[in-house]
Image: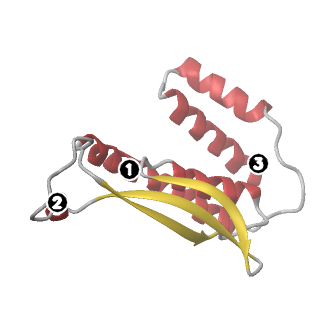
Amino acid sequence: MGFLLSCLLRLLLWYLLTADSSAVNLLIGVALALLLPHAEGPRQPLGPLLRALWQALVAVPQAYGEALALIGGGREQERWLELPASAPSQRLVIFLEVLAITLTPFTLVLGLSRVDGRPIYRIHQLRPMPRHSRTAPKGTTPSSED
């Protein structure tokens, strides 16, 4: 089951990277998914892997929405977040979580650190400011850098 999921994930990533659904491209993707080395070791629980895979898939339409917001222009609000990692012992789960966070244009994972023995992602996030707060307050003038 793990081998099949690994191959399907690799094929999905290949398709997302190339954005070409021709038969030749899919055959190349299948060949790469099968030929690249697979992790060996003790079996890992399937639950955290499926949750991380779902988060990565949900991040794709969210990324399109954020890209449209980015095209719309305007100012962004900067935030620094720390989010807990779900399964620190599974490298594939960590990869999928980082992919889901970083896939969106407004977020970037800066690192993985430990706080009180628990792994935490350090994240830089931009969010579009609400329309009403984009104007300069009374008595100030917008700078020429905007």
> Given the image, on which type of amino acid does mark 2 rest?
Arg
Left or right: 61, with 86 as reference point: left
Q: Earlier in the sequence, mark 1 or mark 2?
A: 1
Residue 132, image quadrant: bottom left
Could you say which quadrant of the image residue 11 lies in? top right
> What crowding class fits label 1: few (fewer than 14 Cα within 10 Å), some (14-19), or many (20 or more)?
few
* Residue closest to the far top: 24
Residue under the point 76% across and 48% down = 3
Q: Residues within 10 Å of mark 2 (few under 14, many from 20)?
A: few
Residue 1 appears in the figure: no
Q: Which mark is residue 61?
A: 1
Q: Nearer the viewer, residue 91 or 24?
A: 91
Q: Amino acid at mark 3?
A: Phe
Give the answer, above or below, for where 117 lies relative to 82.
below
Q: Position of residue 28 (x, y in %)?
A: 65, 23
Q: Which residue is found at the position 52% from the left and 68% from the top?
A: 81
Q: Which residue is mark 2?
A: 131
- Amino acid at pointer 1: Pro
Residue 60 seen in this snapshot? yes
Q: Which residue is mark 3?
A: 3
Provide the secondary structure element on which disc 2 rests: helix
Which numbered disc, 3 or 2, marks the residue closer to the eye? Answer: 2
Residue 48 location in percent, x, y?
66, 68
Which label's residue is closer to the chain start, 3 or 1?
3
